[in-house]
């Protein structure tokens, strides 16, 4: 980085990668990647989500990382944000569950209630 223009370009690229710009066609999948999430297995979940999205060539789905979501005992946690719909929070994720979330929820539009935080008893 040698100039203010270089810094501005880096900023715009970072904003674009994080999915901050409003794009109502995009679905954002947020993965809790604080220490609690990572120690519970969030990295393989993050990778499985990205691999499945790439395999299915889903251009409107972005997977991003965040810090602690706030309910550490349910990690790994992912949250799905889809414009015009309620946020869905999936808990105790595994790579296998993550792939199923892509196929059932993202591709077919069916929330997997058994994986959601609303299913906690």
Image (cartoon, rainbow, N blue to C red):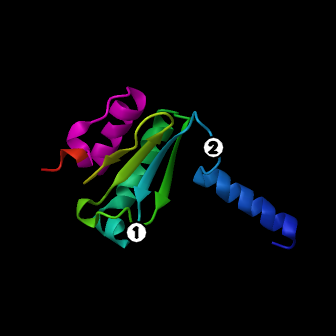
Q: x, y (%) of residue 72?
A: 28, 66
Residue at image position (56%, 35%) is 60
In the image, 26: left or right of 4?
left
> Which one is nearer the viewer's eye here, 58 or 16?
16
Q: Which residue is mark 2?
A: 22
- Residue sitting at the far left: 121
Question: What whole-number distance in Å separates the C-alpha atoms at marks 2 and 1?
Answer: 25 Å
Tell me the tag on residue 89. Answer: none
The image quarter containing residue 14 is bottom right
Q: Is residue 6 above or below residue 52?
A: below
Q: x, y (%) of residue 80?
A: 42, 44
Q: Is residue 41 above or below residue 116?
A: below
> Which one is nearer the viewer's eye here, 33 or 84?
84
Judged by its main secondary structure, the magenta piece is helix
Q: Is residue 6 above or below residue 55?
A: below
In the image, 4: left or right of 106?
right
Residue at image position (47%, 61%) is 66
Residue at image position (34%, 39%) is 101
Q: Which residue is mark 1?
A: 34
Where disc 2 sits, the SS reads: loop
Q: Which residues are magenta?
A: 94-117
In the image, 6: left or right of 99?
right
Whether tag 2 and tag 1 are in contact, CB under 8 A, the answer is no
């Amino acid at each position: 980085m040698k100039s203010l223009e270089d810094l501005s370009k880096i900023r715009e690229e970072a904003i674009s990668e994080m999915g901050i710009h409003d794009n109502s066609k995009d679905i954002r999948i947020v993965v809790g990647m604080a220490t609690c999430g990572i120690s519970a297995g969030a990295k393989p979940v993050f990778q499985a989500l990205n691999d499945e999205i790439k395999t299915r060539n889903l251009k409107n789905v972005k997977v991003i990382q965040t810090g602690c979501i706030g309910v550490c005992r349910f990690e790994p946690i992912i949250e799905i944000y889809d414009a015009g719909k309620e946020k869905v929070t999936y808990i105790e994720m595994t790579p296998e569950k993550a792939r199923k979330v892509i196929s059932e929820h993202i591709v077919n539009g069916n929330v997997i209630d058994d994986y959601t935080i609303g299913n906690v008893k």
